[in-house]
Image (tube, rainbow, N blue to C red):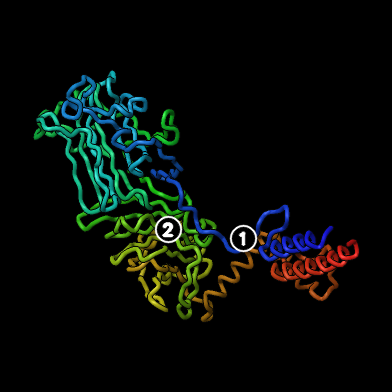
Amino acid sequence: MTANRVLAVVAVLVVAGIAGVVPGGAATPASQSAADTDGYVLEQGDVCQEIDPLETDGTVHSFYDYRNHETHPDTDDNLYSSYGTQHLQADDTSILMLHEGADGTSLVVVHDRLGGASAGGVVTFDVVGTPPEGDWVVRDDEYDAPTNMAEWRAGDGWLGADWIWADGRTDGGAINGGLDDEFALTIHPAFNEESPFYGDETLHDPDWHGDGRIDDWQVLSGDTDDPDRIDLSLSEPVTIRTGTCEAPSATYDRTDDGIVATVDVTDAAGPSTASSEPVRFDSVTVTDVDPADGPFVLERDADRPPTPDEREVLSELAFAGDRFDGAATVAFSLEADWLEDEGIDAEEVGLHEADGDGWSDADPEVRSASDDRYQFEGTVTSLEGLIVTVPGDDGSSDDDRTDHRSSDDDRAEEGETDADADRDDETAGDPVTETETDSSEREPLHRLALGGLVATLVLGAILLRRAGRVR
Protein backbone atom coordinates (compact mmCIF):
# COMPACT_ATOMS: atom_id res chain seq x y z
CA MET A 1 0.00 0.00 0.00
CA THR A 2 1.48 3.36 -1.01
CA ALA A 3 1.61 6.39 1.28
CA ASN A 4 -0.91 8.21 -0.94
CA ARG A 5 -3.39 5.40 -0.65
CA VAL A 6 -2.91 5.25 3.10
CA LEU A 7 -3.60 8.98 3.32
CA ALA A 8 -6.75 8.53 1.25
CA VAL A 9 -8.03 5.73 3.51
CA VAL A 10 -7.26 7.74 6.64
CA ALA A 11 -9.06 10.80 5.19
CA VAL A 12 -12.16 8.77 4.41
CA LEU A 13 -12.21 7.24 7.89
CA VAL A 14 -11.72 10.61 9.60
CA VAL A 15 -14.49 12.27 7.59
CA ALA A 16 -16.80 9.32 8.26
CA GLY A 17 -16.05 9.48 11.97
CA ILE A 18 -16.77 13.22 12.12
CA ALA A 19 -20.01 12.87 10.15
CA GLY A 20 -21.23 9.99 12.33
CA VAL A 21 -21.10 7.56 9.39
CA VAL A 22 -19.85 4.00 9.67
CA PRO A 23 -18.46 2.81 6.30
CA GLY A 24 -21.00 0.42 4.87
CA GLY A 25 -23.67 1.61 7.33
CA ALA A 26 -26.28 4.34 7.60
CA ALA A 27 -25.74 7.98 8.52
CA THR A 28 -26.68 9.20 11.96
CA PRO A 29 -28.70 12.40 11.53
CA ALA A 30 -27.59 15.44 13.51
CA SER A 31 -31.20 16.32 14.36
CA GLN A 32 -34.70 15.14 13.59
CA SER A 33 -35.86 16.38 10.22
CA ALA A 34 -38.90 18.62 9.90
CA ALA A 35 -42.23 17.12 8.98
CA ASP A 36 -42.59 16.29 5.30
CA THR A 37 -44.78 18.90 3.65
CA ASP A 38 -44.61 17.37 0.17
CA GLY A 39 -47.66 15.65 -1.28
CA TYR A 40 -51.39 16.00 -0.79
CA VAL A 41 -54.04 14.44 1.43
CA LEU A 42 -57.82 14.37 1.56
CA GLU A 43 -59.72 14.43 4.83
CA GLN A 44 -63.35 13.62 5.51
CA GLY A 45 -64.58 12.87 9.01
CA ASP A 46 -62.05 10.60 10.70
CA VAL A 47 -60.50 9.53 7.39
CA CYS A 48 -57.23 10.94 6.07
CA GLN A 49 -55.65 9.53 2.91
CA GLU A 50 -52.75 10.56 0.71
CA ILE A 51 -53.63 11.36 -2.89
CA ASP A 52 -51.69 12.11 -6.07
CA PRO A 53 -52.63 14.64 -8.75
CA LEU A 54 -53.53 13.56 -12.26
CA GLU A 55 -50.72 14.87 -14.46
CA THR A 56 -50.73 15.99 -18.09
CA ASP A 57 -48.47 18.16 -20.24
CA GLY A 58 -51.20 20.69 -20.99
CA THR A 59 -53.20 23.23 -19.01
CA VAL A 60 -56.29 22.49 -16.96
CA HIS A 61 -58.32 24.06 -19.79
CA SER A 62 -57.11 21.43 -22.24
CA PHE A 63 -57.48 18.67 -19.64
CA TYR A 64 -61.13 19.58 -18.95
CA ASP A 65 -61.82 20.54 -22.61
CA TYR A 66 -65.16 22.28 -22.06
CA ARG A 67 -67.12 22.79 -25.28
CA ASN A 68 -70.33 24.63 -26.20
CA HIS A 69 -71.81 26.23 -29.30
CA GLU A 70 -69.70 29.37 -28.73
CA THR A 71 -66.34 27.70 -28.13
CA HIS A 72 -66.77 25.08 -30.90
CA PRO A 73 -69.37 26.39 -33.40
CA ASP A 74 -68.17 24.24 -36.32
CA THR A 75 -68.60 20.80 -34.79
CA ASP A 76 -71.33 18.66 -33.33
CA ASP A 77 -69.06 17.83 -30.36
CA ASN A 78 -70.12 20.90 -28.42
CA LEU A 79 -72.74 19.62 -25.99
CA TYR A 80 -71.96 22.01 -23.09
CA SER A 81 -69.81 19.43 -21.35
CA SER A 82 -66.29 18.26 -20.52
CA TYR A 83 -64.79 16.33 -23.43
CA GLY A 84 -61.32 15.88 -21.94
CA THR A 85 -62.43 13.85 -18.95
CA GLN A 86 -64.84 11.46 -20.66
CA HIS A 87 -62.71 8.43 -19.74
CA LEU A 88 -63.05 9.40 -16.06
CA GLN A 89 -66.76 10.22 -15.97
CA ALA A 90 -69.51 7.94 -14.64
CA ASP A 91 -73.29 8.13 -14.58
CA ASP A 92 -74.81 9.81 -11.49
CA THR A 93 -71.31 10.35 -10.09
CA SER A 94 -69.45 13.51 -9.14
CA ILE A 95 -65.64 13.31 -9.36
CA LEU A 96 -63.08 15.55 -7.66
CA MET A 97 -59.35 15.61 -8.37
CA LEU A 98 -56.16 17.63 -8.43
CA HIS A 99 -54.58 18.26 -11.82
CA GLU A 100 -50.94 19.17 -12.40
CA GLY A 101 -49.99 20.55 -15.77
CA ALA A 102 -48.46 23.46 -17.64
CA ASP A 103 -50.37 26.00 -15.50
CA GLY A 104 -49.56 24.40 -12.17
CA THR A 105 -51.95 22.74 -9.73
CA SER A 106 -55.73 22.97 -10.11
CA LEU A 107 -58.79 21.57 -8.35
CA VAL A 108 -61.13 19.93 -10.88
CA VAL A 109 -64.81 19.00 -10.46
CA VAL A 110 -66.93 17.05 -12.97
CA HIS A 111 -70.54 16.00 -12.38
CA ASP A 112 -72.17 13.10 -14.27
CA ARG A 113 -71.24 11.70 -17.72
CA LEU A 114 -71.33 13.13 -21.23
CA GLY A 115 -73.62 10.91 -23.30
CA GLY A 116 -74.70 9.06 -20.19
CA ALA A 117 -77.83 7.00 -19.76
CA SER A 118 -79.29 8.93 -16.84
CA ALA A 119 -81.03 12.27 -16.25
CA GLY A 120 -79.29 15.48 -15.20
CA GLY A 121 -78.73 16.80 -11.70
CA VAL A 122 -78.39 19.69 -9.24
CA VAL A 123 -75.30 20.41 -7.10
CA THR A 124 -73.92 23.31 -5.04
CA PHE A 125 -70.31 23.58 -3.85
CA ASP A 126 -68.66 26.08 -1.53
CA VAL A 127 -64.86 25.82 -1.66
CA VAL A 128 -63.42 27.55 1.39
CA GLY A 129 -59.77 28.42 1.98
CA THR A 130 -58.91 29.52 -1.56
CA PRO A 131 -55.84 31.76 -2.03
CA PRO A 132 -56.45 35.38 -3.13
CA GLU A 133 -55.36 34.58 -6.68
CA GLY A 134 -57.59 31.52 -6.97
CA ASP A 135 -60.52 31.59 -9.41
CA TRP A 136 -62.82 29.41 -11.48
CA VAL A 137 -60.69 29.34 -14.64
CA VAL A 138 -62.92 26.64 -16.21
CA ARG A 139 -66.69 27.11 -15.94
CA ASP A 140 -69.08 24.42 -17.08
CA ASP A 141 -71.36 26.04 -18.07
CA GLU A 142 -70.47 29.46 -19.41
CA TYR A 143 -72.40 30.75 -22.42
CA ASP A 144 -74.93 33.46 -23.23
CA ALA A 145 -78.43 31.92 -23.23
CA PRO A 146 -81.32 31.49 -20.75
CA THR A 147 -80.57 27.78 -20.41
CA ASN A 148 -77.21 28.61 -18.82
CA MET A 149 -78.40 28.75 -15.23
CA ALA A 150 -75.06 28.02 -13.52
CA GLU A 151 -74.05 30.64 -10.97
CA TRP A 152 -70.46 31.39 -9.94
CA ARG A 153 -69.83 33.06 -6.58
CA ALA A 154 -66.70 34.44 -4.89
CA GLY A 155 -65.61 36.17 -1.68
CA ASP A 156 -62.51 36.66 0.44
CA GLY A 157 -61.05 33.19 0.87
CA TRP A 158 -63.81 31.22 -0.84
CA LEU A 159 -65.36 30.32 -4.20
CA GLY A 160 -68.75 28.79 -4.89
CA ALA A 161 -70.88 27.44 -7.71
CA ASP A 162 -74.44 26.24 -8.30
CA TRP A 163 -75.02 23.80 -11.14
CA ILE A 164 -78.09 22.38 -12.87
CA TRP A 165 -77.76 20.27 -16.00
CA ALA A 166 -79.82 18.11 -18.36
CA ASP A 167 -79.57 14.44 -19.28
CA GLY A 168 -76.47 13.19 -21.11
CA ARG A 169 -74.35 16.23 -20.15
CA THR A 170 -71.85 17.29 -17.50
CA ASP A 171 -71.38 20.30 -15.29
CA GLY A 172 -68.34 21.25 -13.25
CA GLY A 173 -65.27 23.46 -13.40
CA ALA A 174 -61.67 24.01 -12.31
CA ILE A 175 -60.03 26.32 -9.77
CA ASN A 176 -56.51 27.52 -10.49
CA GLY A 177 -54.21 30.10 -8.90
CA GLY A 178 -52.18 29.99 -5.69
CA LEU A 179 -52.29 26.20 -5.40
CA ASP A 180 -48.61 25.67 -6.20
CA ASP A 181 -47.71 26.67 -2.63
CA GLU A 182 -49.09 25.23 0.59
CA PHE A 183 -52.89 25.30 0.68
CA ALA A 184 -55.92 23.77 2.36
CA LEU A 185 -59.34 23.76 0.68
CA THR A 186 -62.57 22.52 2.25
CA ILE A 187 -65.35 21.61 -0.18
CA HIS A 188 -68.82 21.91 1.33
CA PRO A 189 -71.20 19.89 -0.90
CA ALA A 190 -74.96 20.15 -1.33
CA PHE A 191 -76.16 17.41 -3.66
CA ASN A 192 -79.67 16.90 -5.04
CA GLU A 193 -82.42 18.23 -2.73
CA GLU A 194 -79.77 19.79 -0.45
CA SER A 195 -78.81 22.27 -3.17
CA PRO A 196 -80.44 25.72 -3.05
CA PHE A 197 -81.00 25.29 -6.79
CA TYR A 198 -83.30 22.31 -6.27
CA GLY A 199 -86.86 23.48 -6.86
CA ASP A 200 -85.80 27.14 -7.20
CA GLU A 201 -88.72 28.68 -9.07
CA THR A 202 -86.66 31.75 -10.01
CA LEU A 203 -84.58 29.67 -12.42
CA HIS A 204 -85.30 29.68 -16.14
CA ASP A 205 -86.27 25.99 -15.88
CA PRO A 206 -86.18 24.60 -12.33
CA ASP A 207 -86.98 21.12 -13.70
CA TRP A 208 -84.00 21.17 -16.10
CA HIS A 209 -82.40 18.31 -14.16
CA GLY A 210 -85.24 15.92 -15.07
CA ASP A 211 -85.30 14.43 -11.57
CA GLY A 212 -81.74 13.23 -12.04
CA ARG A 213 -79.51 12.58 -9.01
CA ILE A 214 -75.91 12.26 -7.95
CA ASP A 215 -75.55 9.00 -6.05
CA ASP A 216 -71.76 8.76 -5.71
CA TRP A 217 -68.95 11.22 -4.93
CA GLN A 218 -65.36 10.20 -5.59
CA VAL A 219 -61.84 11.61 -5.38
CA LEU A 220 -59.53 10.45 -8.17
CA SER A 221 -55.84 9.89 -7.48
CA GLY A 222 -52.78 8.75 -9.40
CA ASP A 223 -52.69 7.54 -13.00
CA THR A 224 -54.41 9.91 -15.42
CA ASP A 225 -55.78 7.11 -17.57
CA ASP A 226 -56.80 4.72 -14.78
CA PRO A 227 -56.79 6.50 -11.41
CA ASP A 228 -57.69 5.13 -8.02
CA ARG A 229 -61.21 6.04 -6.90
CA ILE A 230 -61.86 6.96 -3.28
CA ASP A 231 -65.52 7.00 -2.25
CA LEU A 232 -66.77 9.92 -0.20
CA SER A 233 -69.85 10.68 1.85
CA LEU A 234 -72.22 13.01 -0.01
CA SER A 235 -73.22 14.78 3.20
CA GLU A 236 -69.87 15.73 4.78
CA PRO A 237 -67.30 18.36 3.78
CA VAL A 238 -63.96 17.27 2.36
CA THR A 239 -60.62 19.01 2.87
CA ILE A 240 -57.84 18.64 0.31
CA ARG A 241 -54.51 20.10 1.40
CA THR A 242 -50.78 19.91 1.05
CA GLY A 243 -48.76 17.92 3.58
CA THR A 244 -49.26 14.56 5.21
CA CYS A 245 -51.72 12.93 7.58
CA GLU A 246 -49.24 13.60 10.39
CA ALA A 247 -50.42 17.22 10.46
CA PRO A 248 -53.63 18.20 12.24
CA SER A 249 -56.77 17.89 10.14
CA ALA A 250 -58.82 21.03 9.56
CA THR A 251 -62.21 22.01 8.21
CA TYR A 252 -62.65 25.53 6.83
CA ASP A 253 -66.01 27.27 6.71
CA ARG A 254 -67.22 30.77 5.88
CA THR A 255 -69.31 32.96 8.14
CA ASP A 256 -70.44 36.57 8.13
CA ASP A 257 -67.29 37.35 10.12
CA GLY A 258 -64.88 35.67 7.72
CA ILE A 259 -63.23 32.26 7.37
CA VAL A 260 -63.35 29.93 10.38
CA ALA A 261 -61.08 26.90 10.74
CA THR A 262 -61.77 24.00 13.10
CA VAL A 263 -58.51 22.13 13.68
CA ASP A 264 -58.70 18.59 15.05
CA VAL A 265 -55.55 17.97 17.10
CA THR A 266 -56.70 14.82 18.91
CA ASP A 267 -54.34 12.50 17.05
CA ALA A 268 -51.81 15.00 15.74
CA ALA A 269 -50.68 16.86 18.83
CA GLY A 270 -47.86 14.49 19.74
CA PRO A 271 -46.93 12.24 22.66
CA SER A 272 -47.89 14.76 25.34
CA THR A 273 -51.53 14.59 24.27
CA ALA A 274 -51.85 10.90 23.51
CA SER A 275 -54.94 9.12 24.76
CA SER A 276 -52.87 7.38 27.47
CA GLU A 277 -52.38 10.74 29.21
CA PRO A 278 -55.05 12.19 31.53
CA VAL A 279 -55.33 15.36 29.42
CA ARG A 280 -56.10 15.56 25.71
CA PHE A 281 -56.31 18.56 23.39
CA ASP A 282 -59.33 17.98 21.13
CA SER A 283 -59.78 20.92 18.76
CA VAL A 284 -58.92 24.54 18.10
CA THR A 285 -61.51 26.72 16.35
CA VAL A 286 -59.91 29.79 14.80
CA THR A 287 -61.84 32.80 13.53
CA ASP A 288 -60.85 35.30 10.84
CA VAL A 289 -58.43 32.89 9.16
CA ASP A 290 -56.27 34.10 6.27
CA PRO A 291 -56.06 31.23 3.73
CA ALA A 292 -52.77 32.68 2.48
CA ASP A 293 -51.17 31.40 5.71
CA GLY A 294 -51.58 27.84 4.45
CA PRO A 295 -52.44 24.73 6.50
CA PHE A 296 -52.06 24.56 10.27
CA VAL A 297 -48.70 23.04 11.26
CA LEU A 298 -47.72 22.04 14.79
CA GLU A 299 -44.47 23.30 16.30
CA ARG A 300 -43.07 20.12 17.81
CA ASP A 301 -40.10 21.59 19.74
CA ALA A 302 -41.37 25.03 20.67
CA ASP A 303 -39.59 26.90 23.44
CA ARG A 304 -42.04 28.01 26.08
CA PRO A 305 -41.76 30.55 28.90
CA PRO A 306 -41.19 29.39 32.50
CA THR A 307 -44.14 27.60 34.04
CA PRO A 308 -46.57 29.75 36.05
CA ASP A 309 -45.82 29.73 39.79
CA GLU A 310 -47.20 26.80 41.77
CA ARG A 311 -48.64 25.15 38.65
CA GLU A 312 -47.81 21.87 36.95
CA VAL A 313 -48.00 21.46 33.17
CA LEU A 314 -49.93 18.40 32.00
CA SER A 315 -49.74 19.04 28.27
CA GLU A 316 -48.73 21.67 25.75
CA LEU A 317 -49.54 22.63 22.17
CA ALA A 318 -48.04 25.15 19.75
CA PHE A 319 -48.57 26.07 16.09
CA ALA A 320 -45.87 27.30 13.74
CA GLY A 321 -46.04 30.90 12.53
CA ASP A 322 -48.15 33.89 13.55
CA ARG A 323 -51.50 32.44 12.55
CA PHE A 324 -54.01 35.20 13.33
CA ASP A 325 -54.89 38.40 15.18
CA GLY A 326 -58.37 37.37 16.22
CA ALA A 327 -59.54 34.74 18.68
CA ALA A 328 -59.59 30.97 18.95
CA THR A 329 -61.58 28.53 21.06
CA VAL A 330 -59.52 25.68 22.50
CA ALA A 331 -61.28 22.46 23.52
CA PHE A 332 -59.57 19.88 25.72
CA SER A 333 -60.58 17.15 28.12
CA LEU A 334 -59.34 15.45 31.28
CA GLU A 335 -59.98 12.01 32.72
CA ALA A 336 -62.46 12.26 35.57
CA ASP A 337 -60.84 9.38 37.51
CA TRP A 338 -57.43 11.04 37.30
CA LEU A 339 -58.75 14.30 38.72
CA GLU A 340 -60.43 12.42 41.56
CA ASP A 341 -57.30 10.39 42.34
CA GLU A 342 -55.21 13.58 42.43
CA GLY A 343 -57.74 15.41 44.56
CA ILE A 344 -58.13 18.21 42.01
CA ASP A 345 -61.40 20.00 41.31
CA ALA A 346 -62.33 20.66 37.69
CA GLU A 347 -62.45 24.39 38.46
CA GLU A 348 -58.73 24.26 39.36
CA VAL A 349 -57.70 23.17 35.84
CA GLY A 350 -56.02 25.99 33.93
CA LEU A 351 -55.47 26.85 30.26
CA HIS A 352 -52.74 29.39 29.49
CA GLU A 353 -51.47 31.04 26.31
CA ALA A 354 -47.93 32.26 25.76
CA ASP A 355 -47.67 36.04 26.24
CA GLY A 356 -44.15 37.29 25.64
CA ASP A 357 -41.93 35.88 28.40
CA GLY A 358 -44.87 34.68 30.45
CA TRP A 359 -48.36 33.22 30.31
CA SER A 360 -51.90 34.63 30.27
CA ASP A 361 -54.75 32.72 31.90
CA ALA A 362 -57.46 31.76 29.39
CA ASP A 363 -60.00 30.94 32.15
CA PRO A 364 -61.36 27.65 30.75
CA GLU A 365 -64.90 26.60 31.52
CA VAL A 366 -66.30 23.12 32.02
CA ARG A 367 -68.63 22.52 29.08
CA SER A 368 -69.70 19.01 29.98
CA ALA A 369 -68.88 16.23 32.41
CA SER A 370 -69.36 12.48 32.34
CA ASP A 371 -68.14 9.47 34.27
CA ASP A 372 -65.15 9.30 31.93
CA ARG A 373 -64.01 12.85 31.07
CA TYR A 374 -64.49 16.52 31.78
CA GLN A 375 -64.74 18.69 28.63
CA PHE A 376 -63.21 22.18 28.84
CA GLU A 377 -63.20 25.23 26.56
CA GLY A 378 -61.22 28.43 26.70
CA THR A 379 -60.67 31.45 24.43
CA VAL A 380 -57.15 32.52 23.45
CA THR A 381 -55.70 35.21 21.21
CA SER A 382 -52.52 33.42 20.16
CA LEU A 383 -51.50 29.93 19.11
CA GLU A 384 -47.80 30.50 19.77
CA GLY A 385 -48.03 28.27 22.83
CA LEU A 386 -50.78 26.67 24.91
CA ILE A 387 -50.49 24.72 28.17
CA VAL A 388 -52.95 22.91 30.42
CA THR A 389 -52.02 23.11 34.11
CA VAL A 390 -53.18 21.99 37.55
CA PRO A 391 -52.09 23.17 41.01
CA GLY A 392 -48.60 22.00 41.92
CA ASP A 393 -47.88 19.69 44.86
CA ASP A 394 -46.50 21.81 47.73
CA GLY A 395 -45.68 24.63 45.36
CA SER A 396 -43.72 22.41 42.99
CA SER A 397 -43.11 23.33 39.38
CA ASP A 398 -44.22 21.40 36.34
CA ASP A 399 -40.78 19.77 36.17
CA ASP A 400 -41.65 17.59 39.19
CA ARG A 401 -44.68 15.99 37.54
CA THR A 402 -43.08 15.97 34.09
CA ASP A 403 -39.87 14.34 35.36
CA HIS A 404 -41.88 11.76 37.33
CA ARG A 405 -43.98 10.93 34.28
CA SER A 406 -40.92 10.80 32.02
CA SER A 407 -39.03 8.46 34.39
CA ASP A 408 -42.09 6.18 34.59
CA ASP A 409 -42.34 6.19 30.78
CA ASP A 410 -38.61 5.44 30.44
CA ARG A 411 -38.85 2.52 32.82
CA ALA A 412 -41.96 1.24 31.05
CA GLU A 413 -40.14 1.37 27.71
CA GLU A 414 -37.22 -0.64 29.21
CA GLY A 415 -39.60 -3.18 30.80
CA GLU A 416 -38.77 -1.96 34.32
CA THR A 417 -41.50 -1.86 36.97
CA ASP A 418 -41.60 0.04 40.25
CA ALA A 419 -40.58 -3.18 41.98
CA ASP A 420 -37.56 -3.42 39.66
CA ALA A 421 -36.62 0.13 40.60
CA ASP A 422 -36.83 -0.72 44.31
CA ARG A 423 -34.55 -3.72 43.82
CA ASP A 424 -32.09 -1.51 41.98
CA ASP A 425 -32.04 0.86 44.95
CA GLU A 426 -31.46 -2.00 47.42
CA THR A 427 -28.50 -3.38 45.43
CA ALA A 428 -27.00 -0.02 44.55
CA GLY A 429 -23.78 -0.83 46.45
CA ASP A 430 -23.27 -4.31 44.97
CA PRO A 431 -20.58 -4.89 42.31
CA VAL A 432 -21.96 -4.66 38.81
CA THR A 433 -20.97 -7.27 36.26
CA GLU A 434 -20.91 -6.76 32.53
CA THR A 435 -24.22 -8.58 32.07
CA GLU A 436 -25.90 -6.40 34.71
CA THR A 437 -24.86 -3.13 33.14
CA ASP A 438 -27.90 -1.25 31.76
CA SER A 439 -27.65 -0.16 28.17
CA SER A 440 -28.73 3.32 29.23
CA GLU A 441 -25.35 3.66 31.09
CA ARG A 442 -23.27 3.39 27.95
CA GLU A 443 -20.87 6.10 27.01
CA PRO A 444 -22.51 9.18 25.41
CA LEU A 445 -22.41 9.25 21.63
CA HIS A 446 -19.98 12.16 21.42
CA ARG A 447 -17.43 10.30 23.57
CA LEU A 448 -17.68 7.23 21.37
CA ALA A 449 -17.24 9.38 18.29
CA LEU A 450 -14.15 11.08 19.82
CA GLY A 451 -12.68 7.72 20.79
CA GLY A 452 -13.26 6.41 17.29
CA LEU A 453 -11.58 9.47 15.78
CA VAL A 454 -8.49 9.04 17.98
CA ALA A 455 -8.29 5.34 17.15
CA THR A 456 -8.62 6.17 13.45
CA LEU A 457 -5.73 8.65 13.62
CA VAL A 458 -3.51 6.12 15.45
CA LEU A 459 -4.36 3.48 12.87
CA GLY A 460 -3.51 5.93 10.13
CA ALA A 461 -0.11 6.66 11.65
CA ILE A 462 0.67 2.95 11.92
CA LEU A 463 -0.31 2.37 8.33
CA LEU A 464 1.85 5.29 7.21
CA ARG A 465 4.90 3.83 8.99
CA ARG A 466 4.31 0.41 7.49
CA ALA A 467 3.88 1.93 4.08
CA GLY A 468 7.20 3.72 4.51
CA ARG A 469 8.94 0.46 5.33
CA VAL A 470 7.47 -1.22 2.29
CA ARG A 471 8.75 1.54 0.04
The crowd level at tag 1 (other Cα within 10 Å; few <14, some 14-19, many 20+) is: few
Q: Which quadrant of the figure contains the C terminus?
A: bottom right
Tell whether 43 sits left or right of 198: right
Residue topped by disc 1 = 29
Residue 297 is tagged as: 2
Residue 33 at what x, y percent from top left? 54, 59
Q: Amino acid at mark 2?
A: Val
**63 shown above or below 254:** above
Residue 78 is tagged as: none
Sequence order check, earlier mark of 2 and 1: 1
Q: Amino acid at mark 1?
A: Pro
Residue 127 at what x, y percent from top left? 28, 45
For the point 28% across and 31% down, which residue is it?
Answer: 65
**344 shown above or below 289:** below
Tell whether 253 sits left or right of 334: left
SS assignment at label 1: loop
SS assignment at label 2: loop
Residue 408 at what x, y percent from top left? 63, 65
Q: CA distance from mark 2 to mark 1?
A: 23 Å
Tell whether 83 sits left or right of 464: left
Give the quadrant of residue 320.
bottom left
Q: Is residue 83 visible?
A: yes
Q: Which quadrant of the figure contains the N terminus?
A: bottom right
Give the quadrant of residue 261.
bottom left
Give the quadrant of residue 319.
bottom left
For the point 51% across and 81% down, which residue is it?
Answer: 395
Point out the residue furthest to the right here.
Answer: 469
Residue 16 at what x, y percent from top left? 70, 61
